[in-house]
Image (cartoon, rainbow, N blue to C red):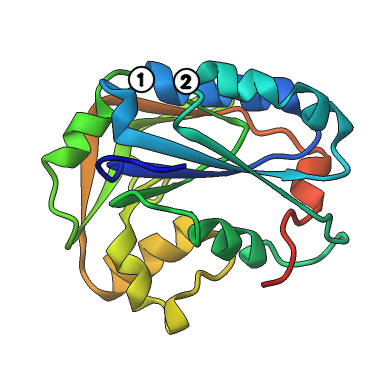
Amino acid sequence: MSFHNPPISTFLLPSLWRFDRLLESVRSIFETCHGANNIEVVIRLHLSDTEAYQRARELFEIDPLRIKVIWGDDKPVGTSNEWLWNDLLKHALGAWLQFWSDDLILHGKGWDTMLINTPTEGFLCQPEIHRLNHSIYLENMDGPAPFVPREAMKLFHQGRLPKLPDVACYDLLVKHYGWKVKFLPGIEVQHNRINDRTLAVSYAHEI
């Protein structure tokens, strides 16, 4: 994947054994931005995920230039997911990072242009609306899916993320360093959480 200009935001997206949900999630990213040239989506899939392997071309039908798929070995149950995020992080080119999940759907329009007008130091950008299954939260400070400046990764020990990167970024940048949270008006993240195999298995090989 190469760009004439770096993307505004990189979505780092692991997925396992639920390809239809993955497609829906990725489509929502492209449908809610003002310009596909502003984003990239880096997806991590398991070599053992036969359905994803057979249907991977459907991802590139959404956007053949802005989607990158990384295949990797399975990790056993109980292995920390921090390997996943740090593996995906190596491929990120965007000024802003989004630690995404295939059970998240983005709603609204123009989050990418809102990021363009936000400094990449001193701010996290949070969707204004957080919908968790049937519950709705407005301006949920520590909700899921913050947009995090890529340069902020330098503030983590050895530039590496711990587990639960959205929570870790909020705790370090907002609580410790005093960064502000900017809510993106009209932007909603819908979290249809399901407890299935995806949540029980780590996705990436050790780096």
> Residue drawn at (59%, 65%), measured in percent from left and top?
163
**Residue 95 placement (x, y as % from top left):** 28, 52
- Name the residue rendered at 61%, 27% in the picture: 192
Asked whether the beta carbons under mark 1 and mark 2 sit within 8 Å of each other, the answer is yes
Secondary structure, mark 2, is: helix
- Residue 137 versus residue 169 in the image, above or below: above
Q: Amino acid at mark 1?
A: Thr
Above or below, 161 against 91 in this view is below
Quadrant into which the C terminus falls: bottom right
Instruction: Name the residue beneath numbered marker 2.
Output: 28
Name the secondary structure under disc 1: loop
Q: Quadrant of residue 120?
A: bottom left
Name the residue rendered at 21%, 69% in the picture: 178
Which one is in front, 137 or 153?
Answer: 153
What amino acid type should be assigned to the residue bearing mark 2?
Answer: Ser
**Mark identifier at residue 53:** none
Q: Is any part of residue 135 visible from this angle?
A: yes
